[in-house]
Amino acid sequence: MLTIKSSGDVLEFWVETDAPYGRVWETLEEKMRAMRGFYKGSKLPAHFLGKKFTEMQKKEIRSFLQKEIGISEVAFSDDEDICIAPQPEVLPEASAPRDLFFRGTLRSGQRLENEGNIVVIGDVNAGSELIAGGNIVVFGKLRGLAHAGAWGKSDVVIAANSLMPQQVRIGGKIAIIPQGREIEGPEIVRIQDGKIIVDFVG
């Protein structure tokens, strides 16, 4: 219904064209408030693509993002005074996804999603999620769910200084990491011979 993507110099809000505004609004509030610490005071402009909104709906969305999150520039694909280049629906090989960097602690209920790589400088707590089209690297403790290659890639890795996730996924493969392991130091999760394996980086 609503997908938020960071393309490096803009935050893109992709909204299903037939999604009811009430549900779009609830999803927007939920996602942005969950990630308030990440987006608060963002200097990036926000562009809404897909669904067309009424002027009253646009005003409500702009007010929310500006007052609650601090995003000062909010534009919509059908605004007369802006020009947003049309985007291909699905062309993963033709684009070069940007890396997403997050500094801080990702708490339960929070979620980071990016078409490219995700790099976290801090801890990822249980109950949080990292969803990346590329690799996932955590300079800290990884306790939440991590899904690398979420859009089909399998030649990616999940790396963390301390690997204690509830679940890891690479492409279409899923693995549960046993709790209580006595391994200290960074590890890398990858696919080998069709199976998910964990390598100690010593």
Image (cartoon, rainbow, N blue to C red):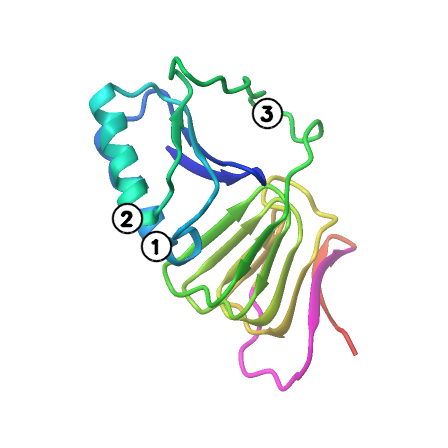
Where residue 128 sits, quadrant-wise, is: bottom left
Q: Estimate the spatial distance between the alpha carbons at disc 3 and disc 1, rounded to whole Å.
A: 28 Å
Residue designated by label 2: 68
Residue designated by label 3: 90
Q: Is residue 18 magenta?
A: no
Q: Determine which of the numbered discs, if any, sits on residue 34 in the image.
A: 1
Q: Give 170 or 114, whichever is nearer the viewer.
A: 114
Residue 20 appearing in the image: no
Q: Give 56 or 169, whichever is nearer the viewer.
A: 56
Q: Is residue 183 magenta?
A: yes
Residue 103 appearing in the image: yes
Kind of residue sitting beneath label 3: Val
Element on which disc 3 rests = loop
Image side of residue 80 versus residue 94, left or right:
left
In the image, the segment drawn in magenta is 176-192
Element on which disc 1 rests = helix
